[in-house]
Image (cartoon, rainbow, N blue to C red):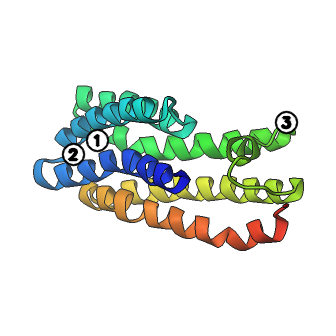
Amino acid sequence: MKEKNSLIKSLIEIIPLILFFITNAKYGIIFATKTFVITTLIALIVSYLYFKKVSTPLLITSFLVLIFGGLTIFFKDPTFIKLKPTIVYLLFSSFLFLGLKLKKNFLKIYLSSLIKLNNLGWDILTKRWSLFFLAMAILNEIIWRNFSTDFWVSFKVFGFLPLTIIFTILQQSLIKKYSIK
């Protein structure tokens, strides 16, 4: 049941991104952004109806999609939607780093029901994720400022997601090393 829910959660969160990619290829970035905003709202509602709650990352991302997508649509300027991933990644990175400074490991709070690590393991994993999010913010800036909008949209779907999956897989040895039973 847990795996089924995880798959459903992933699908709910990735479908708006896939539709963003498809509509951008056919109709351009402004129409794609409209599609992204609408499907993100639908994903938020479906997530709530199915799980009776909305995950914090989905809530934050949805809020920023609405703000930056709305600005993109209103001003007909794709710069706003291109900035959204940078801001999301910087927020997540800052939030995790701030938690460590305040002796409050937010990653542990968020994932402790799924992963059991000792405190050192949680701190290392949190630092890694913080740095990963920072690197992703920098990568987004490099790509949207130096490549075409179509390339950026493609990389958003086929670059950022695989990089995140690869990074997650690479954390398995750390998780095994610091795992508690």
Residue type at mark 1?
Pro
Residue 4's x, y, as percent?
46, 53
**How many numbered circles does the render carry?**
3
* 2 or 1: tag closer to the N-terminus: 2
Residue 10's x, y, as percent?
44, 51
Which corner quadrant of the image does residue 16 belong to?
Answer: top left
Q: Which residue is mark 3?
A: 102
Residue type at mark 2?
Ile
Q: Which residue is mark 1?
A: 78
Residue type at mark 3?
Leu
Residue 179's x, y, as percent?
81, 64
Which mark is nearer the camera, 3 or 2? Answer: 3
Horizontal side, residue 148 vs residue 99: left or right: left
Quadrant containing the C terminus in the rendered view: bottom right
Residue 152's x, y, as percent?
33, 57
Which corner quadrant of the image does residue 136 belong to?
Answer: bottom right
The residue lying at 41 percent from left, 65 percent from top is 159
List the single residue furthest toward the front.
1
> How far apart in space, not on screen, are marks 2 and 1 (Cα)?
7 Å
Of the numbered discs in the image, which one, if any, rests on residue 46?
Answer: none
Contact, CB < 8 Å: mark 2 with mark 1? yes
